[in-house]
Each structure stands twice: as C-alpha cells, then as structure tokens.
Amino acid sequence: MLDKQQGARLANLWDDAKAAGMSEAERLLYRSNLLGSDKRITNYGGGNTSAKVMEKDPLTGEAAEVLWVKGSGGDVGTIKMDGFATLYMDKLRALKGIYRGVEFEDEMVGYLPHCTFNLNPRAASIDTPLHAYVPKVHVDHMHPDAIIAVAASKNSKELTKKIFGDEIGWLPWKRPGYELGLWLEKYCLENPKARGVVLESHGLFTWGDTAKEAYETTIEIINRAIAWFEGENTAPAFGGEAKPALAASERVAIAKKLMPVIRGLISAEEKKVGHFDDGKAVLDFVTSTSLEPLAALGTSCPDHFLRTKIRPLVVDFDPAQPDVEKTLAGLPEAIAAYRADYARYYERCKRADSPAMRDPNAVVYLVPGVGMITFAKDKATARISGEFYVNAINVMRGASGVSTYVGLPEQEAFDIEYWLLEEAKLQRMPKPKSLAGRIALVTGGAGGIGKATAVRLMQEGACVVLADIDETALENAQNELAARYGKDFVRSVSMNVTSETAVEAGFGDALLTFGGLDILVSNAGLASSAAIEDTTLALWNKNIDILATGYFLVSREAFRIFRSQKAGGNVVFVASKNGLAASPGASAYCTAKAAEIHLARCLALEGASAQIRVNVVNPDAVLRGSKIWSGEWKEQRAAAYKMDVDDLEAHYRERSMLKLSVFPEDIAEAIYFLASDMSAKSTGNIVNVDAGNAQSFTR
C-alpha cells in the first residue's frame, strides 16, 4: 500500500500567464524547475530535460537547430540558464557516421565538446544522445518513484503495457550512453504515436511538441502510475511489521549514540558527516519482515545506486529488546565485515581497466525500529543520499507489492559505479578544502569572535554548530551563514554553558544533525569590572560559572564524543590576555580567565593519548562586533583608565607593542590554525593575538 504522500497526485503547476512571455529556452528552464520541485518526480541531481530550439548561429548568422539540455552534474529543480549545455543538432546527428559500435560507445562522450554551440562552457552530460536522438522538440527524463516501481518489477514490460497500453513503451535495461540514445530514436520512429517510454530498472522518458505538453504529459503519466498502485498495491507494506518502531524520543536517543561511533569507524581515510531520517517511509521499511532480503538486493535506478552504494548495512539492533550497548559493541565487526564483503564484490566484478577500489564503507545504515543513518563527505551529500534511499524504499514498496522487486545485476551495478566516465568526473572535482568533513561547535557563536570563527571554519569546508544564549542573535547569525555557505553547513542551538542539561542537549542536537564532532571552540564569555571591595559574590560567581564552569562543561561533553568516535579531537579555548597579565579592577574576570588557561593545560594532558589536542588563543581588546564590549564593560574599562569611551580603542592600539587594533577575524585566524592540521603536532599551547603585550608573554 502506498503511504499518504506517495498516494497523493502530482499537481499541475504550469502557469500559462508566466510562460507566455518566455523564449523557448526560458520555458525549458521553467519546466525543469517545476519538475524538480517534487522529489516524487526526481531527486536532487537526477533526471534531465531538453528542448531543440532554433537559434541564430553566431558564425553564419543563419538559423541553426540547437539542443538545450541539462549540463553534467546539474539539478533540474535549481538549474538556471547557464546550467544547460547547448549543442548543434546537425553535428550531433553527424556523430552517427563515426560511431564504431556499442563496445566503443564511451568514446562518443569525447566528441560532444566538438558539437558545442556558441562556445558554451557548460559540459554536456552522458545523457545528451538520449535527448538528441528522440525526434521530439521537448523531452523529459525523470526518475519518479511510481514509474521506477514498475521498471524495477520482475515483469516490468507486462506491467507497463497493463497500465499505459500503447501510449508508453518499454525498453530493456541498458546503461545510459550513446547506444541507448539510438535505441530511443528507433523506438520513437517505429512508434510515432507513443508519448513516452519506460526504461527497465531506470526511469521514464516523455516528450511533446511544446514545453507545456511535455510537462503535462510527464505529470499525467506519473499520476496514472500512482493511481494504479493505489488500486492494486493493497497488501501491508513490505510484508507487514516484524519489529516495533520505538517512540520518537527513543529513536533519537539511540541515533545520537550510534552516529559518532559509526562515524569514527568509517572516517579513517576521509572525515564523514552524517544525516538521520526516521520518517514514515523509512520506519515502514526498517520495521518490516522484508527489511533484510530487500536491502540485500540494493537499488535499481542508476542514480539511486550511485548515491547509496551496492547495498546498505543493516545494523544488528532489536527494538523489541533494545540493548544499544550490545549494538555498539558489535559495530566494529559489522563494519569490518561490510568492508570485506565490498572488497570481494570489487574483486569479482573488476575489469582490466577498472579504477582502484574506492571507499569500501557503507553509505546507508538501516537500524530496525529506529531509522536510517547516512554518512558521506559532507552534510548535503549525506542528506541527498538518504533522500535517494527513501526513493529506493518507495520503489521497493511498490514493486514488491504487485510483483517481485529486482535490483540491478551485480556486474551492471559495478560497471556503473566504476565507469571510467564516472571516474573521470570524480577526478575533475576540486580538491577538498582543509576542513572538509569536519564538524565544529562554537560557543558564543552569535557574537563577534564566535561568528568570525564560524565564517573562517566554514570557508575551509567545515560544518558548524553555533551555540549561544542570545536566541535572536543566534537566529540572525545562522540565517546569515546559511545564505553565504549553504544551509547544510550550519545549525544553531540555544545553549547556556552554565547548565549541564543545556550543554548535554546542545551537543546531542549537534550529534543528530551532523553525526559527530571534531572541533570545539569554547568562546562563550562575559566581562566585568569592579574593584575587589565592590565585587559582589554574585558577580564573582557569574564570572566563574561562565568562564570556568562553562568551559569545563562543554569540554567534558566534547571529550565524551571524541572518545566515543576514537578519532581524536580538537579543543580551542578563547581565553584572554588577562588570564596571564593582571588588570586593575577586574579580579573576577582575570581569575576566571586564568582558570580557563589552566583547565586547557589539564585537558591537553588528559587528551593526548587519544589524539585530542587542546590549545588556547588569548585575545586582547577586540572591540569591533563584540557583545561584551557593547555594554557596561566598555564604560567600566574607560572609567578604570580615566578616559572617554570613544578613546578606548585608540588607547588599546597605542598600548600594544605593534600599535595595531585587534579584530574578530584576527582571533578567528588563530583559532583556524589551531583547529586545522597545520598545528597537528601542537597541544597545550597558548597563542597570544593581542598586537604585542610584554606582560602576557608566555615565556
């Protein structure tokens, strides 16, 4: 039985008024974005769209037929005009004359750049011939769950005929490429009245004479498949429930325990970032009688497979008698067994020219009664991999409910995963940034130094959790950084660092969001100024609570995560020049900052055997953007030095040996150095960023 979301019909979103003033290429873009807006039609990066458009040739001035087609690596839902490749149709047709047969079809990709129209730098994808040779103006190639459920059924040809009659044809499995383009052309010429074709184990091609017709045909055909499954697939999903789904709070608690341990076990060669999904589709699957046999078959659609690997790892966990400690203890062996099995798969299927074996770890981890965990090189890839596996679950649900689900044959799956063209694309990808795959939590993350630190770490590819007590500033900071670096790379948690409960909850949220932790920047702070005789116990305790106890609480939680990951860790304290050099009228603040520095030394000793590094940055007089310096502290320090508030920054600049002001970005640069592998052999150190102050020299 299809769940409620799957059973709902797709809406026709085409707006004639919007499309009326568009060029043919702009209508292609409009159509693409509409189709990509619903994951039931195609997932991120999946599918392809095209249009054959008459354009003025910049060389001859004559009209030329040009294929506009989604470029390599693009996403139809978010594509813009520059995301389309443009190619001369006459040159694409001329390629038939040099095609040497199916065993040489990969070499045809090398000829596509010679067909480029108007020097367009957007690379054409492997799907280009599939669109070029369909003799229709507008062509859609989508990966709808409902259609792939037909395509991945054992009797997919018969089901296609039963559902669509002669309107939609069927072609047997064929890897995407030049030969499949010729197959599609042949089918269209022999079946001129057909409106599309189902590709076995792959997806759907539809077409039309106008952009609107192509779009509406795609929506109509998918809806017909959804309706057919709704009527035919009435049995309990995946054979019914075999194990119970735990309560939401229990699922989350177990995921938080599993994710850092899994992450540590699979991140030896490359740091991974995680994602957790316990939505209805996932829970239906991970509680079912068919979980293990269906999971072992892997996925069918090539796009699903490339994102989710040969098969998922089903974690040994019994929700009827939950024993998470037993599961944790068994993870090293289970993950090692998966890697060994993957290596055997590689050895069985490799060809003489196959690329070297890649990362043998699973991408998808299915936990009975709990949900799905995915790990990848970054958060976006982990999330998208999970979304693709949800698509695969929907496909298995539909196919197994009306027929027998069939995954890709092992050799075909290998040939796609280790396709030389896919390897070439991977080799063209830019080198990972220095903190790619790293996860950082920054306390005081909404303030001047904290936010500047988050920016610096995100510039180097890190995922960052901003923690702060100021919820308004926190929301503003998250929105700003999400707009600059992408929402997958930043999250925020409201955290009072003096509260044990709040700290544990905040770190737990970070674990659930990203799967682990690599870097803690302990930066939450305050400042106070009062003569000793005027220092109240409340003021003293407030400094100690935030600057000493708070640093202890967040460090303790970070250490717990680091030890569970068994992959090292990195702590950077933001202390102060005042932790080394006394200042008049600030005994509570200076004492608490000195405590921070000594705590860091203690933690450096404790963490060294586990490769946990702990270092300190000592700023001085960072006024710009600081919440600390925006209130009484600035006035108090001005009073202590008997000067006007407006003269304070100049006073600190002139007091320094280098006669320079210190800014949040300067502190962030030092934090990045200590958090990165540039300082891999440094722990227990203090870096002063104070423009020079002899009193705070550490030696």
Image (cartoon, rainbow, N blue to C red):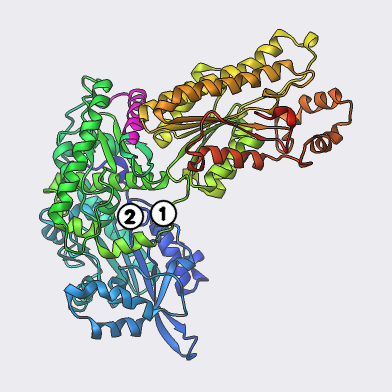
Q: Residue at 79% of width from left, 19% of height from top?
A: 584
Along the line of sight, which residue is nearer the eye, 438 or 610?
610
- Out of 208 and 450, give the one closest to the viewer: 450
Looking at the rendered image, the quarter that the N terminus falls into is top left
Q: Are marks 2 and 1 in contact (CB under 8 Å)?
A: yes
Mark 1 is on which residue type?
Ser
Name the dominant secondary structure of the magenta segment. helix
Q: Residue drawn at (14%, 62%), measured in percent from left and top? A: 161
Give the amino acid type for the residue marked by disc 2 in the picture. Answer: Ile
Q: In which quarter of the image is residue 466?
A: top right
- How would you rate the neighbour count of disc 1 (Cα within 10 Å): few for under 14, some for 14-19, many for 20 or more? some
Residue of label 1: 37
Q: Which mark is residue 4?
A: none
Q: Which quadrant holds the C terminus?
A: top right
- Residue nearer the viewer, 139 or 97: 97
Q: Is residue 331 above or below residue 531?
A: below
Task: Please tell me whether residue 631 is drawn above or below residue 419 in the rendered image.
Answer: above
Say which residue label 2 marks.
41
The image shows residue 234 at horizontal and vertical percentages of 17, 41
Q: Is residue 278 visible?
A: no
Query: Magenta includes 687?
Result: no
> Which span is picked out in magenta?
245-264
Q: Residue 555, position in %: x, y?
A: 50, 24
Give the crowd class for mark 2: few <14, some 14-19, many >=20 residues within 10 Å: many
